[in-house]
Amino acid sequence: MTTTYEPVIGLEIHVQLLTRTKMFCGCELSFGEPPNTRTCPVCLGLPGALPVANAQAIHFGLMIGLALDSELAPRSIFHRKNYFYPDLPKGYQISQYDEPLCRGGRLADVRIHRVHLEEDAAKLVHVGASGRIHASDASIVDFNRGGTPLAEIVTEPDLHSPEQAGQWLRLLRATLRHLGVSDVNMDEGSLRCDANVSVRPEGSRELGTKTELKNMNSFRFLERGIRAEIARQEGILNEGGRVVQETLHFDPGSGEITSLRSKEQAHDYRYFPEPDLAPVAVSETMLAAARQAMPELPSARAVRLQDSLGLSAESAHLLAFRPELGDYFEQALQSSPDSTPSAGAQAQALANWVTGELAKRLAPEESPADSKVSPEAITVLSQMAAEKQISVGAARQVLDRLVAEGGDPRTLVEQEGLAALDGGDELRQIVRAAIAANADAAQRVRAGNPKATGPIVGYVMRETKGRADGAEVTRLIAELLG
Amino acid sequence: MSAEELVSLGAQAAAQALASGQIAAHELYEIYRSRAAADDLNCFTWVAEQTPAPPAASPLGGVPLAVKDLFCTEGVPSQSGSRILEGYLPPYTATAVERLLGAGACLLAKTNQDEFAMGSSNENSAFGPVLNPWDRSRVPGGSSGGSAAAVAAGLTPWALGTDTGGSIRQPAALCGIVGFKPTYGAVSRYGMIAFASSLDQAGPLTRDVTDAALMLRHLIGYDECDATSLDFPGEIALPTAERLDGVRLGVPEELTGEGIEAGVLAAFHATLALAEQLGATVEPISLPHAAHALSAYYVIAPAECSSNLARFDGVRYGMRTEAAGDLTEMYTRTRHDGFGAEVKRRIMLGTYALSSGYYDAYYGRAQCVRTKIVEDFRNVFADVDFVVTPTAPSVAFPLGSKTADPLAMYLNDFCTVPMSLAGIPAISIPCGLALPPEDRNVTEAASGGGLPVGFQIAGPAFSENRILETAFALEQAIGFDGGTVRA
Ligand SMILES: [Zn+2]
């Protein structure tokens, strides 16, 4: 009989902060500029150059701490993490060690261990066949990235499946994006994730030996990597082996896991307080500024949308966790006329249009704000449909046109003659004609089969180009055949 | 004015003569340039080849300036006395130098120093030892030995140096000139090739106290490029005091007894007597933790230097030894070939002190001692205005006499290190001559009167102006004549 294991997963996330300048110098952040054009004596580690901490990075760090419900340290210090590598021009990385900017906290059901600030390394490109530093012909260094501010967010080991890890990371990404502190783009490396993975027999409270999976650069690879590592560890334990604490690399191409270094080879980083920097003393003013800058967070927004607008839980969640939809929705809502007795229903209808029909017509991550459909237009369209000025089908046609070329839905409805036919004589005449043209179907309806109205309704819709209200048509058929 | 008369002018007198049009900037510069170029004490690692355009009206109006090698000077070799930076031309200039040049000083030369400022005799320079102008068989002190010897020998009106554990004050003492280490943070460290970041501080080496005040006036001030720099309260005034009435001098028993040469102690006590004649009171005090200062210093400074010097890896600038093997071999060979023995010794000491498992016992402990020393000074400054000691325990010693014994060499910093650890300002002024111990059987007349002794005055943080006033009054009373070695 094989043991069932419970995976225990913790994440270490590096987020490049979207400050104007680097962590410790005045160079602007680089977005694909030619190599080594965003550098200065400080970020090149030239002799005599000194670091000065970026106030905006500290501000962003505090905002992250507030968003994750962390305890913000009134005084934190930078340390030097010493090791030699060509992407590290000073021979040490300035990072935070035992006195980080934020401690503790929580996001959804995962506890946060700490959040600290540090500087990014430069980018190494290995020239030659292997693409790794060993056996490459040469390595070249681009210092544009070197010194970019990073926030490192470390969770407690509260995740128990690859899927849960992926889901939670998506939630963290949405939260950080909403704060506006980072691009949080995994492809471009502004969001990077390491995972600490261990397994233990189901029911056990003790933690197993963990391994560290390095730098998984997409959500898919993160989940696949963790899955592969769980399987590897279970295999070792099932064969009576012992998991070794080591740092691992997951190759998404081959699905293989290889060892980077074991604990015995681990560096002694010789951390000590960075003597070139004063401690970070967080003043009341800095705290107030961070609080002031906090946008409403997704979880709070979901509650508000549900409570004050009466949206369904599902709509509220969708709008809250896709802030681009939420922002657009709320802007659209503001453009609608003053609250009416049916405001709640209108808001829900508008939410449905935004999260459903409109989102469906956009590219996967496209913001509706960037589309041709103005918030006013979607509001008008939603209202026209709710008030049955146009049929749902006609409204969809109008939306197609809006997405393609923009404009005012009222004008479009008029131009195309899409206004709903009310229950007047015109519609009655068309229904009569439809019954006449579908004598068989009419016969079956009279014989007591209501489902047989299909061809008659279809005829009406063709004739009216979808302008007729379906319910009204059904009522008229029943009346005329009754 | 004759060349001799021009060279006899200190920096302040020269600045005045330049401002009044009595002398021309290019004339003064050319005299010093030719003197510096003909230097046979090995004071310089670089001497300007051209006379710069005379500066527009400015406070220093074209006074030539020598700068310690470790200050980055744009386009001018800045090597910190090390093979690993041989020929290195920085793309920028250190703030301290920038400020002096901005006030009208003209860069004349870069001065020799112990490699990365690690040493007390200038024998650790990759570019050879500097000779003491008082006695060419002796060391000028270190690490700012080139700066001190050049000022004493009249090869420059003044020089900029740095002090980590005594590197301005001790060579100033051994060369018979004035050296001032300001409050930590008063002068920007930006562009100073670092030795020990929490201790390094730039300051003047000058012929007299007035010149030290003048240079300090233009050096101090907050620099947004140095996160540890501080706003200096007020300005530095040129000192005028003649009396020391009411000034309380504290003499710490721990730094004025054993281990100090008799001749040095005699000159020190004679100066105390002079201070009393000027109205000062002299009181014995105690700095109970001063005896541990040297031990703490030789943990903290190497620890910081082991990290500060990691950037010299052969990747981006400076020397590289090409290696057939991997990256690690390139690093190893470059650093093996590029660093001198003392630098390697301190990197190893510091690396060890920071290693996991040893950190608390060494670095942590040393920081505790440092805190205690800060408290010691705070306590004594409640009772006295200044702490005074001999600057160095000996007069200039013979070249090569201590190179084989690092611990004996480290003892040179015995009286200066406590002030460095506390971050407080201290000046060294020449207070007389003393015979070296090995010459005791020689009469004073036969040895030319002896070698210079330094008198150290330390005060609380930001007491620069009060220290300068006290030093000035004493200087006038002492009447030390350093002119003989300039001739
Ligand atoms: Zn930079």
Image: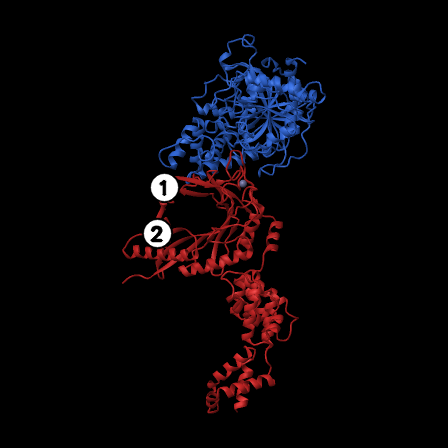
Chain colours: A red, B blue
Displayed quadrant of residue B228: top right
Q: Nearer the viewer, residue B321 or B286?
A: B321
**Mark 1, chain letter?**
A
Neighbor class of circle 2 (other Cα within 10 Å; few <14, some 14-19, many 20+) is some
**Which residue bears the numbered disc 1?**
A134
Q: Position of residue A246 (x, y in %)?
A: 36, 48
**Which residue bears the numbered disc 2?**
A257
Q: Position of residue A103 (x, y in %)?
A: 51, 52
Q: Nearer the viewer, residue B432 or A287?
A: A287
In-image side of A301 versus A252 (left or right): right
In-image side of B13 versus B452 (left or right): right
How far is disc 1 from disc 2 in space, using C-alphas?
18 Å
**Mark 2, chain letter?**
A
Q: Is mark 1 within 8 Å of ligand 1?
A: no
Picture residue at 59% right of the left edge, 70% below the top:
A309
Q: Position of residue B146 (x, y in %)?
A: 54, 22
**Regarding mark 1 in the picture, which secondary structure is present there?**
loop
Picture residue at 50% right of the left edge, 9% below the top:
B441
Picture residue at 64% right of the left edge, 35% below the top:
B232
